[in-house]
Image (cartoon, grey):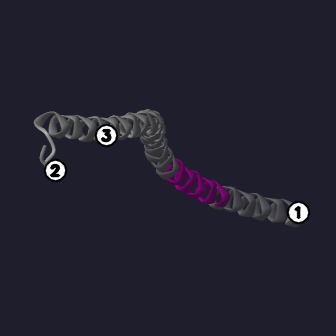
């Protein structure tokens, strides 16, 4: 016989290498599957956090719109109240002048009555 491996030995060597490669591929696939599970959990957590953030953002934006409306109404009410306050102040000053004038006339009348 010759020192060259027989065809059967070559096939056996190829089968052993194939089995080894298959085991390595299986181990890699197991690691990939584990990493995929970790990534799935992380994606689910991230999805939950994004959904929560979107909900919070929508709530904040809704409240902001309501508060903006309230601020606009308060601003209009303030302007109206300021206008009314100025009108009341003017009427008060007019009443004060009228009252002072009436008091001066009464005083003049009293003085005339006391002189007689």
Say which quadrant the C terminus sits in.
bottom right
Magenta stretch in the rendered image: 81-96
Is residue 57 on the magenta stretch? no
Secondary element at tag 2: loop
Residue 105 sits above or below residue 10 on the image: below
Instruction: Answer with mark 2 or mark 1, whichever residue precedes in sequence.
Output: 2
Residue at 79% over, 62% down:
107
Residue at 44% over, 41% down:
57
In the picture of the structure, the residue carrying the numbered disc 1 is: 114
Is residue 94 on the magenta stretch? yes
In the picture of the structure, the residue carrying the numbered disc 2 is: 3
Q: Nearer the viewer, residue 78 or 91?
A: 78
User: Callout 3: 10 Å neighbours few (<14), some, many (20+)?
Assistant: few
* Percent x, y of residue 7: 11, 37
In the picture of the structure, the residue carrying the numbered disc 3 is: 20
Residue at 74% over, 59% down:
103
The residue at the far front in this view is 1
The alpha-carbon separation of the residues under discs 3 and 2 comes to 26 Å
Label 3 vs label 1, nearer the camera = 3
Pointers 3 and 1 in contact (CB under 8 A)?
A: no
The overriding secondary structure of the stretch rendered in magenta is helix
Label 3 vs label 2, nearer the camera = 2
Secondary element at tag 3: helix
* Mark number displayed over residue 8: none
Residue 105 sits above or below residue 26 on the image: below
Pointers 2 and 1 in contact (CB under 8 A)?
A: no
Instruction: Answer with mark 3 or mark 2, whichever residue precedes in sequence.
Output: 2
* Percent x, y of residue 84: 53, 49
* Percent x, y of residue 110: 82, 60
């Amino acid at each position: 016989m010759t020192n060259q491996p027989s065809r059967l030995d070559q096939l056996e060597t190829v089968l052993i290498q194939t089995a080894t490669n298959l085991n390595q591929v299986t181990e890699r696939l197991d690691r990939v599957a584990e990493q995929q599970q970790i990534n799935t959990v992380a994606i689910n957590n991230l999805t939950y956090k994004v959904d929560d953030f979107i909900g919070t953002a929508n709530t904040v934006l809704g409240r902001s719109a309501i508060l903006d409306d309230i601020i606009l109404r308060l601003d209009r009410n303030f302007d109206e109240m300021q206008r009314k306050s100025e009108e009341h102040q003017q009427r008060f000053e007019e009443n004060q002048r009228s009252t002072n004038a009436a008091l001066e006339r009464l005083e003049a009348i009293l003085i005339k009555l006391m002189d007689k």
